[in-house]
Amino acid sequence: MFTPLQSHYPADNVQQLMELHFFKEVLGWKQLASFVDAHHLTDEIPRPATVEGMRKLSHLYAPYLYIHFVCLHQSNSVYRLVVTRSDTWEDVFISEIEIRSALEETTMALLTLGAGMREGNRCTSSDDEGRYPLFDSLNVWLKRQP
């Protein structure tokens, strides 16, 4: 399951995840309710777009990875791509990139791994600065999985 980074740059993140050829099935946030309905789980999961609904889906249908973007506003913008296990709600992969504010003379990207704070998804950046490096790091991590 995937929730996108809020951005002024429209992107098909679901398609990009499918093109990694790792996942059997990829659902976007907008397809979640239809998926629950198609699998006759609406009575058990009336609100699938909640943490509780996503946990129930994991137990009633199958465990899955919840992949989502997080953005932190600091002096610079910090973007994270987080992979969370649906059965334990544990973050199993976090990739982070820091992009200097528009007031800076240059744009810098730094990839790191680690856990940390969460705030809303309010950042915007170009694909080259934000999305592509995060997807690249996800792809490297996925290739290392058994």
Image: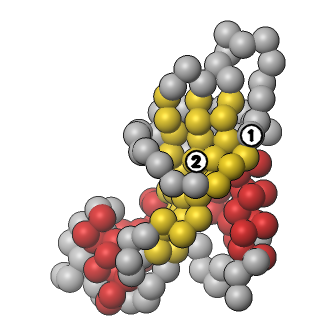
For the residue marked with disc 1, what is the amino acid? Leu
**Observer-nearest residue: 61 or 65?**
65
For the residue marked with disc 2, what is the amino acid? Arg
| Residue 57 pos. (x, y %) | 34, 80
Q: Residue 59: which quarter of the image?
A: bottom left
Q: Label 1, secondary structure: give it.
A: loop
Dividing the image into 4 quarters, which one contains the C terminus?
Answer: bottom right
**Residue 105 as seen in the image, left or right of residue 28:** right
| Residue 146 versus residue 12 in the image, above or below | below
Question: Viewer-nearest of labels 1 and 2?
Answer: 1
| Residue 62 pos. (x, y %) | 43, 89
**Residue 28 as seen in the image, left or right of residue 44:** right
Report which residue position mark 1 lands on. Answer: 110
**Residue drawn 59% across the image and 41% down it:** 79
**Residue drawn 46% across the image and 60% down it:** 29
- What is the spatial separation of the Cα atoms under label 1 and label 2, in whole angstroms? 11 Å
**Residue drawn 32% across the image and 76% down it:** 55
**Residue drawn 32% across the image and 89% down it:** 60
Which of marks 2 and 1 precedes in the sequence? 2
Q: Are marks 1 and 2 in contact (CB under 8 Å)?
A: no
Q: Residue 129: which quarter of the image?
A: top right
| Residue 71 versus residue 29 in the image, above or below | above
**Residue 23 as seen in the image, left or right of residue 110:** left
Category of crowding for the residue at label 1, using alpha-carbon neighbours closer than 10 angstroms: few (below 14), some (14–19), many (at least 20): few
**Residue 81 as seen in the image, left or right of residue 86:** right
Report which residue position mark 2 lands on. Answer: 80
Category of crowding for the residue at label 2, using alpha-carbon neighbours closer than 10 angstroms: few (below 14), some (14–19), many (at least 20): many
| Residue 70 pos. (x, y %) | 50, 46
Q: Label 2, secondary structure: give it.
A: strand
| Residue 122 pos. (x, y %) | 48, 33
